[in-house]
Amino acid sequence: MEREKVKINEEKIKEQYSYMHLLSERNKARAAETGMLPKVYIQTFGCQQNESDSEKLAGMACEMDYVLTDDPKEADLILVNTCAVREHAEIRALSITGQFKHLKAAKPELKIGICGCMVSQEHRKEDIKHKYPYVDFLFGTDMLWRFPEILYASFNAKKRLFYLDQGDGNVFENMPVKREYDFKAYVSIMYGCNNFCTYCVVPYVRGRERSRDREDVIREVELLVREGYCEITLLGQNVNSYGRDLYSDYDFADLLTDICKIEGDFWIRFMTSHPKDASHKLIDTVAREKKIVKHIHLPFQSGSDRILKLMNRRYTKADYLSLIEYAKEKIPGVAFTSDVIVGFPTETDEDALRPKKWNRCPIRTKNADLPSCSTFRTGSRSRRTPKKREASSGSSSRERARQTPINIPGAPKRTDSSTLTLTKAI
């Protein structure tokens, strides 16, 4: 993808600031009449990348002289930042949006907008268009930087506005950010994904991989360190792919090395790593640099090579365990976290229980244990498993997996049938 089609130029960023100025003047004029500035409520679903996006939305809203509120009943502007990785998250977002209907009825001037991954899907856009007539505007992930323009247009339009992603990239710099915390911060180093795992919608709702310029990333981290932030998390759908669209001789490990050269007392974390791209060079960098937290989040998703192939993960169990062994050898005391999917289409009992045969823990080795693991189940097995398989078993492997989670010593009892987080003291 050509760089000029990926990075938003300065003129377009200045144009967004002009819209922020116009809306700021509007809100100040209203405050002169009512005695208070309007308030904005932001509801966020999904991953850390969505949380980071919401911090950018909050920054732009504050630049327009909105005041943040935790109570949607007080809000004059409501933004719902959605997730599309699991259907459950989409249903929750739509349910929450439905609860705002009575707020709109009581306050017709209230603006309601939906953004994020979910609305980048055509069928969800149509759902909102026809079933949620009180939603004023929606925009996908590529349009995040145009939020001021979209909000300004909403105040001046006589109809609802629906902005679909245009595929022209969303790498933008120098827009305001309102951080949720004053001691830790998210820094996005890239957007999108090229892996196309068969169960994942990310490449379709966030586009192909697009890296930020290394100078921009380093400059942002330098500023955060000067402002006193002591824990900085580098974000990307697959951070190990950083720079492949920009540089021929500079990768994520090199970026980490350069960031660690910044003067100051701070920690660096990063997520998420894809096992097929996690290199020995990266592990060596984590081992060498004192400012990098000795923690690696490395999703394995399945303990079955057959299922991994169906998932298009492009690594095997042996590949994965080899990485773990190397990291444990090079990084004493390293902590691992991971994700696993249970109930993948055509998965058998043997496939589902295979991780338990890895000495109980999917990435347990001679000296390593798994501090945290998130387990996700897919949709109904009865709709996806061949009939003769169902006939040969009294209950599905998904049902048994729900009843018998992976046995990690010290893990809490399972309370949610859709997501399981297992933790033990590190």
Image (spheres, rainbow, N blue to C red):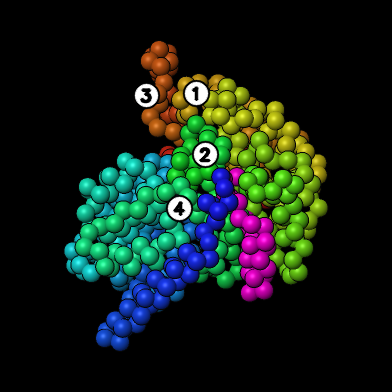
Which callout, 1 or 2, points at the residue further toward the start of the chain?
1
Who is closer to the viewer here, 257 or 307?
A: 257
The label on residue 375 is 2
Could you tell me if the residues under marks 3 and 1 are in contact, i.e. CB atoms within 8 Å?
A: no
Label 1, on which residue?
A: 347
Residue 357 placement (x, y as % from top left):
63, 26
Which callout, 3 or 4, points at the residue further toward the start of the chain?
4
Q: Amino acid at mark 1?
A: Glu
Give the distance between the C-alpha atoms of the residues marked 1 and 2, in whole angstroms: 15 Å
Q: State whether residue 244 is above or below residue 103.
A: above
Which callout, 2 or 4, points at the residue further toward the start of the chain?
4
The crowd level at tag 1 (other Cα within 10 Å; few <14, some 14-19, many 20+) is many
Q: Amino acid at mark 3?
A: Ser
Which callout, 4 or 1, points at the residue further toward the start of the chain?
4
Label 3, on which residue?
A: 382
Label 4, on which residue?
A: 142
Residue 99 figure quarter: bottom left
The crowd level at tag 2 (other Cα within 10 Å; few <14, some 14-19, many 20+) is many
Give the distance between the C-alpha atoms of the residues marked 3 and 1, in whole angstroms: 12 Å
